[in-house]
Amino acid sequence: MSPTATRRKMTDARKHGALDEHIAQVVERALEEDLGGVGLSAAADLTTAFVVDDMGSARARILARAPGIIAGGQVAEAVFRRLDGAVEVEVLTPDSSAAAPDQDVLAVAGPAGAILAAERTALNFLQRLSGVATMTRAFVDAVAGTGAQITDTRKTTPGLRRLEKHAVRCGGGVNHRMGLYDAVLIKENHAATAGGVAAAVARARGSAAERGMGQVRVMVEAETEDEVRALVAASAQLRPDRILLDNMGLDQLRACVAAAREAAPSIELEATGNMNLATARAVAETGVDVISVGALTHSAPALDLSLLFV
């Protein structure tokens, strides 16, 4: 194996391990919320404890009630296994796959009490994340063939950002910055305090260099064609990596794309602000590289899924 391949494998392993740890933490909090934090035992489920006489083994399936893109299978599996290690889970429809109505997504077998106690928490994760993936795929399909990519924002459910951004990838989208810590994104209030968008980018570049962070990505919002022209007119080392064309109409987007492509074709261009399925393709056809859609994570309806004993 080449040194590059070895480094890539080690990096992937670290990322996978970090995701597993994050899932474990999120699942722990969710089960504590539902079971009262009393040892995370199925016995805390009063309904099951009071009503179900036979607490032996059972088999169940999670199935789709509506068409959609599945995301969150690993999280749902972690819920069942955390409650009782004897529960066996088989993922029948992997993440990123399309599910048709009545299609089985997961098969579960093990102690009946554990399955019943974990049911809602597992479904909450699976329905939420699959809803995000399904909405993302709708946007991706809407702009197919234009060359534009669909990306998310930081408008995520607190505590679930990494999982929701995973769901966006399952739907065929790409991720924006993960948080405030991994990229610079200059918005209007930042620019106002710095003396304008171009001055703000120059200050960010200088600060990054002083702190030994010269490789950090610098992005900036622009609201007018004049701001775009000022950004692309700067020297190459003081230009942003990406310009976010904020709340612009189609004609304004086309003009800004033309100006940026002529002066600085390497700068990425992102259309942002109030995007919806009805307008996404027209926006993509203006020539932007990326379209950000906050609704992917703040307004996606949950995919209808059910757990049934078999």
Image (tube, rainbow, N blue to C red):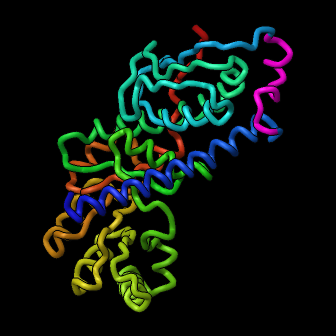
Query: Residue 197 at what x, y percent from top left?
Result: 39, 79
From the viewer's perspective, is 99 left or right of 85? left
Of residues 212 and 276, the one nearer the viewer is: 212
Q: Which residue shows up at 65% across the image and 25% down it?
A: 119
Q: Is residue 33 magenta?
A: no
Percent x, y of residue 56: 71, 13
Provide residue 209's location: percent of width, then percent of height: 37, 88
* Left or right: residue 211 compared with residue 267: right
The answer to which quarter of the image holds residue 306 is: top right
Residue 131 in view here: no
- The structure residue drawn at horizontal position 21% and vertical position 57%, both measured from the top left corner, is 1
Residue at position x 52%, y 33% from top? 301
When asked about the image quadrant of residue 7, the answer is: bottom left
Hey, which residue is sitting farthest left in the picture?
262
Q: Is residue 108 above or below residue 71?
A: above
Magenta-tinted stretch: 39-52
Residue 190 point in image, percent of width and height: 49, 78
Q: Is residue 33 left or right of residue 61?
A: right
Residue appearing at x 42%, y 22% in the figure? 92
| Residue 45 within the magenta-colored segment of the rendering | yes
Outermost residue, bottom side: 210
State which quarter of the image contains the C terminus.
top right
Q: Nearer the viewer, residue 276 or 33?
A: 33
Vertical side of 202 occupied by 182: above or below: above
Q: Nearer the viewer, residue 215 or 206?
A: 215
